[in-house]
Image (cartoon, rainbow, N blue to C red):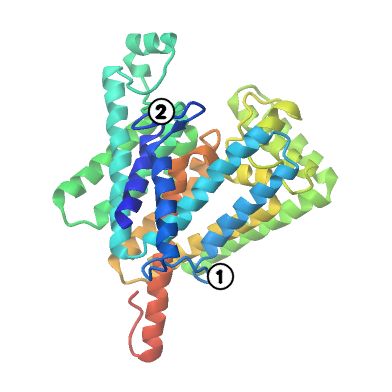
Amino acid sequence: MKKLGYLLIASVFLGTDILAVNAGIAQVSMYRMLLALCVITISFIYIRRDPAVSLRFNLQDNQFRYVYLIWLIIGVFSFIWARDSGNWMKGIFFVGVGTFTIVLTSTLMTSQRDLKKCFVILFSMIGFHQLMGLYEIMTNHYIWADLSGPVRANFSANSGARVPYTTFTNINDYSTLIFASIPLSCIILFNTNKKWLKGLSILSILSTLFLLYRTGSRGNQLALILFVFTLFILKTMKRRYLRVILYSICIFMVLFIGAYFAVPSLRYSIYSVVIAFIRQSGSNVYRINLLLNGFAFLAQSFGFGVGAGNIETWMVESPIFVVDAPNIHNWFMDILVAYGLITFILYTLMYLYILRQLYVSYKYSYNPFIRSSSFFLFAYVISFVASSISSASNIFIEWQWVLWAVIIAFVQLTEKKESENNIIKKGNPTISNVY
């Protein structure tokens, strides 16, 4: 069953162009077929009461699964007030697929060996996209990308303008994927004794820097800076100062959202200040307008959200501020505006808990794999805030659900190691913390 799980993780990076089946109304990717097979197989095993597979949920060990399941349930009920049933179905499909992926991955990948294999698979598959991206830049040969004639002609005449696409339709989606290779390459580099694999990790980091430059994705370039800055802070800042910063950010967000809904004049003041600050033309103005529209939609829906997959519908039908595209371009705003305050608060608390657990594991674990992996994943989780503003809608990007499924499985592994160590310490207080 674990082998099927590994294949599932690898297949998501093939997209809907490689080894996919045309079902008429949609392309059925290898990942979706394998996910359906996994659900059927694990259900059959569970019905037979195989002790190797347990789907018994308890709040302490499965808080992540509960958050995503509540997210999915709220999304399903949002059909009641969603304007566009077609987009609602699309939103529910991707949240449902992502939720099942997270449940399956956290159920199957429970050991350190499992997670090491997962990281290698992720590293290898993103590496495939790196190689293909470099190939496209050098040869101007695009195997899967459906580029228009003028674009291809421009790339032929000006090799310096060529950018990679591989299986993606948007350059920012490709850039977001490539950035995710940075923490994975670092994890591989510091957790392998094989010189050839260390060399590949270094080459992967260098190629990522080049590809991020060629894509010109400001969100992911900012994420790279934030990633490096976070690593520096982790190495130099004491825990109590970092805790104060995280708690202060959390309190500020709660107070700001509360005041935003309680004081209408504050909303208009914020709009006026922001508009005055960015009074210019260009994509930056439209990005700000997307966020302002999102907050307005949230207020109009009384905090319940506009419904799964319905942000684009509202952006087209009821925009207050002028935008150039209907996609909100922000993972967190996508959750807040579409699925409402309850989902957003639960997700934010889970996000902060993941950061807290990764930080504790980095600071206090004597397990080299857990310590180094936590170090780089903490920086990625922080920098994802910037990376997630690049793509038009991260909710519909399946590989991100898989990556977060692996991150959550890793965090659950650190919890398991910590719990086992606490049991040992209770039995023998002289034993030090070695989880």
SS state under label 2: helix
Horizontal side of residue 272 vs 225, given as left or right: right
- How busy is the neighbourhood of tag 1: few (under 14 within 10 Å), some, or many (20 plus)? few
Q: Who is closer to the viewer here, 272 or 298? A: 298
Amino acid marked by disc 1: Leu
Q: CA distance from mark 2 to mark 1?
A: 42 Å
- Point out the image quarter for the N terminus: bottom left
State whether residue 81 is above or below residue 372: above
Asked if one can make out residue 178 in the rendered structure from this viewpoint, the answer is no
Residue 135 image-quadrant placement: top left
In this rendering, the count of numbered labels is 2
- Tell me where residue 104 appears, x and y as whole percent: 43, 56
Question: CB of mark 2 within 8 Å of CB of mark 1?
Answer: no
| 148 with respect to 143 (left or right) | right
- Decide which of 100, 193 is in the foreground and name it: 100
Q: Is residue 329 above or below residue 361?
A: above
Tag of residue 59: 1
Q: Identify the residue at horizontal 38%, vertical 78% (top origin).
A: 420
Q: Nearer the viewer, residue 21 or 234?
A: 21
Image point (28%, 55%), residue name: 117
Closest to the camera, between mark 2 and mark 1, is 1
Q: Is residue 328 left or right of residue 7?
A: right
Q: Is any part of residue 27 visible from this angle?
A: yes
> Which residue is under mark 2?
215
Q: Secondary structure at mark 1?
A: loop
Q: Amino acid at mark 2?
A: Thr
275 shown above or below 433? above
Q: In this orientation, which residue lies closer to the viewer: 156 or 205?
A: 156
Name which of mark 2 and mark 1 comes first in the sequence. 1
